[in-house]
Amino acid sequence: MKLVPPPASGPEGVRRVGAGAADFAVTGGYYYLAAGPSPGARCVIMLAERSPLAAIVRADSALFEPGDLAGRRVGVAKLGWLYDEYVAATKLLGVDPPVRTEVSHDAPHRAHADREIEASSAWVDAVPVVRNRADVDIRAIPIGPDVYTTGIIAADRVPDQTVSRMTAAIAAAVDELGRDPKAGVDLLTTDYPDIHPGDAVECWQLFEPFAGPREMSSERWDRTLAHATFTHGGLAARDAATVYRTSA
């Protein structure tokens, strides 16, 4: 197996996998769905069994529970879809909507340090990255619904046997991380020297409660698709059978 840089970001990355830029890729469920009804790829295993969405707040904040987030200033920068996820999640929890607060696109996390915002929206394992960029201690309040998010896609041209070997390897890797959170960190930091080993381990420990690369459920995919179309305008309704398949 050879690791290659992402062929592109967002939905375009999904379409490029389908077009031949890579055989597999890690991507978000929203990006996959936004790539269109026939992107030439399918979801084959999910890394997030349920949404690790969180409200990111300063460590010294008085906010601790989802109910505390009602009416708070929440930052919006480049990833507006994450704010949409935040709004939908808090609505499902019965929490009053946030106050949308535009922040710098170049340094959005500094808004925490400058107290321009009271929260931002991110996956829970983004805590080390946000903390480093905000230059202030932060923590996460999980708010994600019970839906799929991040997963592995395979190009439709990849043979079923190869897909099966890949999904088995991913599941085994996650099991190993459950036993030893430091497994593979040396290799990761060799390939990506800008990553701090401690941050990598912390990311996994934050994400682990949401991980679950097991057999995908049509019931959970139906719930995921309903949530996605509810949350993001412009997404066409999809049948779960067209989204996840271990065979091409």
Image (cartoon, rainbow, N blue to C red):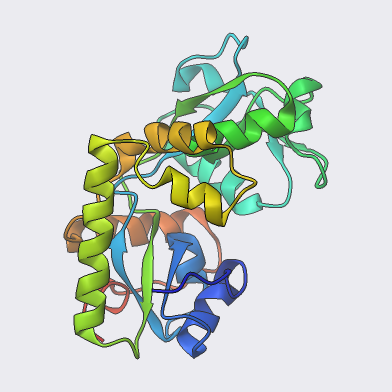
**Residue drawn at the location 78% of the way across and 30% of the way down:** 110
**Front residue of 182 and 174:** 182
Q: Is residue 94 visible?
A: yes
Q: Nearer the viewer, residue 212 or 34?
A: 212
Residue 156 in the image: state x and y as whole percent.
34, 87
Compared to 122, does 38 lie above or below? Answer: below
- For residue 245, say whether it is visible: no
In what quadrant of the picture does the C terminus appear? Answer: bottom left
Percent of width and height locating residue 49? 28, 48
In x, y percent, where is residue 60? 62, 9
25 relative to 126 in the view: left or right:
left
Quadrant in the picture for the N terminus: bottom left
Residue plotted at (76% across, 22% down): 113
Which residue is depicted at the point 24% across and 45% down?
176
Query: In this figure, what is the number of numbered marks?
Result: 0
| Relative height, residue 21 to residue 203 (above, below) | below
Q: Quadrant of residue 23?
A: bottom left
The quadrant in which residue 71 appears is top right
Determine which quarter of the picture holds residue 211: top left
> Taking 149 as reference, is 26 above or below it?
below
Kindly identify the residue that appears in the image at 46 percent across and 31 percent down. Answer: 202
Left of 58 or right of it: where is 159?
left
**Residue 209 location, x and y as percent?**
30, 34
Taking depth in this image into account, of 71 and 49 the one nearest to the observer is 49
